[in-house]
Amino acid sequence: MIAASVGVGKGSDAHSAGRSACKQALNEMPGKKADALIVFGSTKFNQTKLIEGVASAAPETLLVGCSTSGEISSEGFATEQSVVVMALASDKLKFSAGRGGGVSANPAGAGVECGKVLRQGVMPASASSALVFLDIVSGDGDAAVQGLRNELGHNYPIWGGAAGDDLAFRRTFQYFDGKAETGAIVGLGLSGLHRAVGVAMHGFLPVGRAWLVTKTEGRGLASLDGKRASAIYEEYFGPEYFKELREGTLPALAVSYPLGILLPGSDEVLLRDPTLFSDNGAITFTSAIPFGTETRLMISDTARGLETVEKAATEVAKRLEGRKPKAIIMIDSVSRKRMLGRRADEEVEIVQRILGRDVPIAGYYGYAEIDGGTVGEALFHNGSILIWAIAE
């Protein structure tokens, strides 16, 4: 049996909010105990005190999670600072928690370090999967996830997301073993009788012409078609309007017009959200854009964004093949949160209508979504919603 429950904590006192959320989740569990906790917390809280509060209510329980740019729960989108705790327990599953530090200095090594611990929790001849959360502000998240993938093997499904910090892009936090830190990748491994599925979708459409990526620098895009990278925005908007966007609120540009890349040998278009424009015309993104690929401006709206949630939830139900979900994790792009505005609550309502109104839901808005549920590479998504569900 797999049991799950969710608790939500609010208020000005970080320790009390964390402890309250955890106790609320545990009160709905069989025996009021859990094998693992997944925690998503607002950066408006003191992060150390917040996680200490959560851990104080369940001191011997595995704990993983991350900071957010908004929290999601079965009760809907939280408009105030909050912390969401999901408690999980099962007599047929073995849970393991892994951590890799130093994402800024050695991201691939951090992923390998995390993966080694998760791999030790795999039971022979059992289904295994993992949820991972990481920092992409201080280091190369793509490399960290690739290191994790290489260590676990390409047949080991992983899903997850990047932590948030309310669009500051300064410092995000990862939660592990009762502590909050930065510059890490953490993961929760599941091994045993279960069915885990995850679906990531975005609902954006291309506008304007295609541009060839002619120079990259890490997560930075230096040139397109031999011109400075910012030319893709300047040509479409015109120099004056682009100047207003560049000097105004940058996330507004990311919400409406991320870039889309078509990977070789794939029909899937991945989104990349800009976070910084340099004076020389280079653009920094939350995830890297590969050299030699084609990219285009992308656009969406509220109606299409909500349609995407329905499509993703329907696909999750299809992949569960009639099984009833026991728990749902929603990892949503912060750009979607800003695009949907007051209608963000409708995402949870749609998921509940399709997958079950009594299924516990925990989630958050962050800076990237990870879909590594099929054989091959783990893909980094921006501007997307990832719906993960577990069933027996």
Image (cartoon, rainbow, N blue to C red):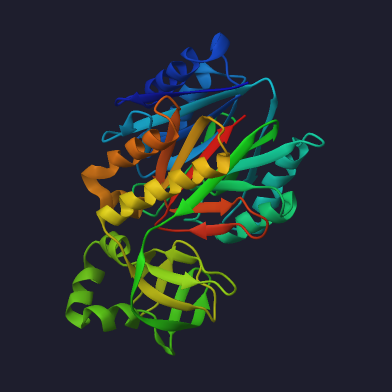
Q: Which residue is nearer to you in this view: 312 or 341?
A: 312
Instruction: Examine the image and state in which quarter residue 83 appears.
Output: top left
Task: Give the percent coordinates (x, y) of residue 52.
Answer: 49, 25
Instruction: Examine the image and state in which quarter residue 377 appears.
Output: bottom right
- Residue furthest right in the image: 124
- Is 127 on the left or on the right of 142, as rendered? right
**Residue shown at 18%/76% (left/top)?**
241
- Residue furthest front in the image: 322
Residue 376 visible: yes
Instruction: Examine the image and state in which quarter residue 178 appears.
Output: top right
Q: Which residue is nearer to you in this view: 103 or 124?
A: 124
- Residue furthest bottom in the image: 226
In the picture, which quadrant includes the N terminus?
top right
**Residue shown at 36%/63% (left/top)?**
204
Up the image or down, 300 lies above or below 31; here it is: below
- Is 279 on the left or on the right of 1, as rendered? left
**Residue shown at 47%/12% (left/top)?**
27
Task: Give the percent coordinates (x, y) of residue 4.
Answer: 52, 23
- Is 214 on the left or on the right of 99, as rendered? left
**Residue shown at 33%/55% (left/top)?**
335
Tally the marks. 0
- Is 126 on the left or on the right of 362, as rendered? right
Q: Which residue is nearer to you in this view: 19 or 106?
A: 19
Q: Which residue is nearer to you in this view: 167 or 153?
A: 153
In the picture, which quadrant includes the C terminus?
top right
Residue 181 visible: no
Task: Give the percent coordinates (x, y) of residue 66.
Answer: 48, 40
